[in-house]
């Protein structure tokens, strides 16, 4: 009765099912592992102190190289940077508010042995197009302390898009700075914790801690887990359903309820003998 399973057609169907089922189970297990990893990372982050309350660490310990991106674990961390200010590539970031007043940021790269990092030395009131006297950065080798920030995006508050004169920068990001300085840059930027008058320190704007709830991507992984296991169950269900239909067709054919391939069409006259 089950000899049809040995036909080329059914061998192909069965082979497809045998390959699809473990693939779906593997993908579902992988997505479940991703969800578990995000949950564990979330719990670990909750057990750790808030990023802003930790002791400052050298920037190189968080970003080993200029190609290392700032992520949720490193953003908002207090850092120290040792190097020399590059006053020749200082930039002003216009239209930035502080305490309800309009002004601009003063951004000066600090060159280190491994590259350079964008450092916002502080905020000044007024128009970046007519900044007046901007305090010069300290000369020689310095060690500054600040908060590591992620690169800004076009939709962030205060970001100015295009049309700026030379010496001004609308968005603080590695992508914006890469064509304005002649050396490799670390990802993100640093805002100093303390400044000298008339500069005022710029408070960190990025998230300083970890969200109290899991992010959407974690629940996406959980949803994908369910989908892959449903796909695996659907393959099993369809295989058995097709087998059942084939058995019913074989039974109907044996009972004569369905004409066979060699049966003559009804209504045709038999040839005379």
Image: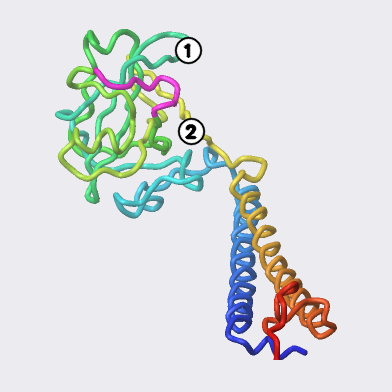
Frontmost residue, 210 versus 270:
270
Residue shown at 31%/17% (left/top)?
94
What numbered label is drawn on residue 99? 1
Frontmost residue, 108 versus 7:
7
Residue 82: x %, y % from top left:
28, 43
Quadrant occupied by the N terminus: bottom right
Quarter location, residue 212: top right
Upstream in the sequence, badge 1 or badge 2?
1
What numbered label is drawn on residue 141? none
User: At numbered mark 2, what does the secondary structure look like: helix, strand or loop?
Assistant: loop
Quarter location, residue 13: bottom right
Magenta run includes residue 117: no
Residue 164: x %, y % from top left:
24, 18
Residue 267: x %, y % from top left:
75, 72
Residue 197 visible in image: no
Image side of residue 40 versus residue 109, left or right:
right
According to the image, label 2 marks what residue? 206
User: At numbered mark 1, what does the secondary structure look like: helix, strand or loop?
Assistant: loop
């Amino acid at each position: 009765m089950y000899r049809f399973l040995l036909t080329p057609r059914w061998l192909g169907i069965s082979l497809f099912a045998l390959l699809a089922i473990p693939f779906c189970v593997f993908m579902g297990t992988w997505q479940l592992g991703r969800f578990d990893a995000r949950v564990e990372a979330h719990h670990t982050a909750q057990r750790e102190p808030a990023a802003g309350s930790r002791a400052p660490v050298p920037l190189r310990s968080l970003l080993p190289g200029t190609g290392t991106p700032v992520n949720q674990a490193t953003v908002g961390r207090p850092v120290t940077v040792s190097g020399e200010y590059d006053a020749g590539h200082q930039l002003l970031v216009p239209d930035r508010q502080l305490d309800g007043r309009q002004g601009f940021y003063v951004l000066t790269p600090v060159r280190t042995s491994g590259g350079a990092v964008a450092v916002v030395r502080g905020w000044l009131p007024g128009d970046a197009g007519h900044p007046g006297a901007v305090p010069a950065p300290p000369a020689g080798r310095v060690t500054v302390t600040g908060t590591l920030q992620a690169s800004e995006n076009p939709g962030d508050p205060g970001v100015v898009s295009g049309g700026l004169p030379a010496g001004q920068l609308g968005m603080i990001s590695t992508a914006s700075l890469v064509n304005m300085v002649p050396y490799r840059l670390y990802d993100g930027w640093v805002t100093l914790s303390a400044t000298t008058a008339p500069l005022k320190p710029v408070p960190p704007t990025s998230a300083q801690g970890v969200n109290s709830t899991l992010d959407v991507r974690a629940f996406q992984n959980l949803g994908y887990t369910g989908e892959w296991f449903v796909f695996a169950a659907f393959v099993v269900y369809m295989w058995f359903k097709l087998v059942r239909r084939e058995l019913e067709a074989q039974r109907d054919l044996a009972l004569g309820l369905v004409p066979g391939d060699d049966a003559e069409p009804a209504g045709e006259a038999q040839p005379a003998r």
